[in-house]
Amino acid sequence: MNPHVQHDETLRPTSGQTAGHHAKLLGAKLREIASVVYSPSEVKTLRRFTSGEVARILGVTDGRIRQLSPELLVSKHEVGPGGRRLYTLADVHALRAHLGEIDRVGRQYLPHRDAERGEHLQVVACVNFKGGSGKTTTAAHLAQSLVLRGYRVLAIDLDPQASLSTLFGVRPDNELAPYPTIYDAIRYGAERRPMREVIRQTYFTGLDLVAADLELEVFEFEAPMAAARRKATDLEPPFFARIALALEEVEADYDVVVVDCPPRLGYLTIAALCASTALLITIHPQMIDVGSMRQFLTMMDEIMEPVREQGAAPTHDWFRYLVTRFEPQDTPQTEVVAMLRGLFGDHVLSKAMLQSAAVSNSGLRGQTIYETPLRRDEVTGSTYRRALDALDNVNGEIEDLIRKAWGRS
Ligand SMILES: Nc1ncnc2c1ncn2[C@@H]1O[C@H](COP(=O)(O)OP(=O)(O)OP(=O)(O)O)[C@@H](O)[C@H]1O
Ligand SMILES: [Mg+2]
């Protein structure tokens, strides 16, 4: 301590007070940032799309979109700066349904799974315990991309930090009343709620969400206590079966479920691993992250062994590593990617997600790339386009894996 400075202990704030003050400052700043994407009613909204964007989403020409009858559209008429009609996501779905009707023999516009043909619900878990490896960004863009491709999608936020919920418009710090989370559908005892009651629709029409909040942590200590007390004759399902059982209740409503896991191998993640039909391990290609992933894989193997002995029999249609935040001009990163491909072969997705200012800028505003229009003050058109292309490539490769799991070509 500097002896020349007089300290008045009564005036000096405690670290608790400083933290409280900082929380208030941060809260005000975050509200200011969020006001860009939230309407005055504090509900997150989605912008409208141009006919060019709709054409890209539906894989047809701009001309074809503009030829379609305006009667098909479900939104109120609204035009952009160029005087051209703007479309909501609900319009996009309506146009897709129409194209599916009139174009039955051509390409398939409505890709919904056919349960009667054995096309089972796909549950894709984004995992890795390395924080910041891109799980939430991947899960959010995958879920939205699949909606844009015409699938019925449920996103589950399994991380008590609630990053995916926040991105999808549910902000724990801003909700007036407690809201249901996945915890309500998997908790023990009579207070458990049906899965249908914890699902909410989002502003991104066609994408449903099960949100998260800190309460999910309770499962992390309830689950081991229940497991220790459990007898083979108990009717309460074991912890590792609880997410799978909750999903069974709503299975018929969806084609794909995307689960954003927390950055650790706790009981929630194990239950997600047991409920999933596919694993996506996100990896930022740096040696330190690879070392952490090795530990994660070892632990996953060791933890799943006793779970399997207790009767869990998770079968995964596919298991892939996704390289995230990749910078192809960075030699050490390309070497790590080459090493991963050399070791794991086809288990590494051939497409990687690039590091992009367009993604991080959208993230800062609480949006995904699919929601953000190009803002030339932030990134150039080519940067934005490159990010969109990289996402479409990655998500297209994942869509192919999903379709293969259904036995489609
Ligand atoms: N492709 C990308 N380009 C640029 N920034 C990215 C990209 N992917 C993710 N980010 C940024 O990196 C940070 C971490 O990403 P993200 O939150 O998706 O990781 P995570 O694995 O979910 O983290 P956690 O382990 O804390 O849950 C975020 O700020 C995000 O905006
Ligand atoms: Mg995350």
Image (cartoon, helix red, strand yellow):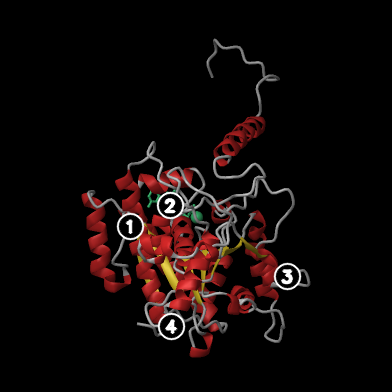
In terms of image quadrants, where is residue 105?
A: bottom left
Q: Circle 1 is placed at which residue position? A: 389
Q: Earlier in the sequence, mark 2 or mark 3?
A: 3
What is the C-alpha distance between the residues marked 3 and 1? Answer: 40 Å
Say which label, 4 or 2, has the lower sequence index: 2
> Can you identify the residue that label 4 sits on?
406
Total numbered labels placed on residues in the image: 4
Q: Earlier in the sequence, mark 4 or mark 1?
A: 1
Residue under the point 62% across and 62% down: 201
Q: Residue at x 49, y 67 (%)?
A: 95
Is label 3 in a helix, a strand or a loop?
Answer: loop
Q: Nearer the viewer, mark 3 or mark 1?
A: 1
Residue 222 left/right relative to 371: right
Amino acid beneath label 1: Asp
Marks 2 and 3: which is nearer the front? 2
Q: Quadrant of the C terminus?
A: bottom left
Type of amino acid under label 2: Ile
Residue 176 vertical position relative to residue 189 in the rendered view, above or below: above
Residue identified by numbered label 2: 369
Query: In whole angstroms, how far apart are the C-alphas of marks 4 and 1?
Result: 25 Å
Q: Disc 4 or disc 1, which is closer to the eye?
A: 1
Q: CA distance from mark 3 to mark 4?
A: 31 Å
Q: Residue at x 61, y 12 (%)?
A: 6
Counting from the top left corner in percent of width and height, residue 86 is at: 49, 52
Q: Disc 4, disc 2: CB below 8 Å?
A: no
Question: Can residue 362 be seen at all in this image of the molecule?
Answer: yes
Say whether residue 261 is visible.
Answer: no
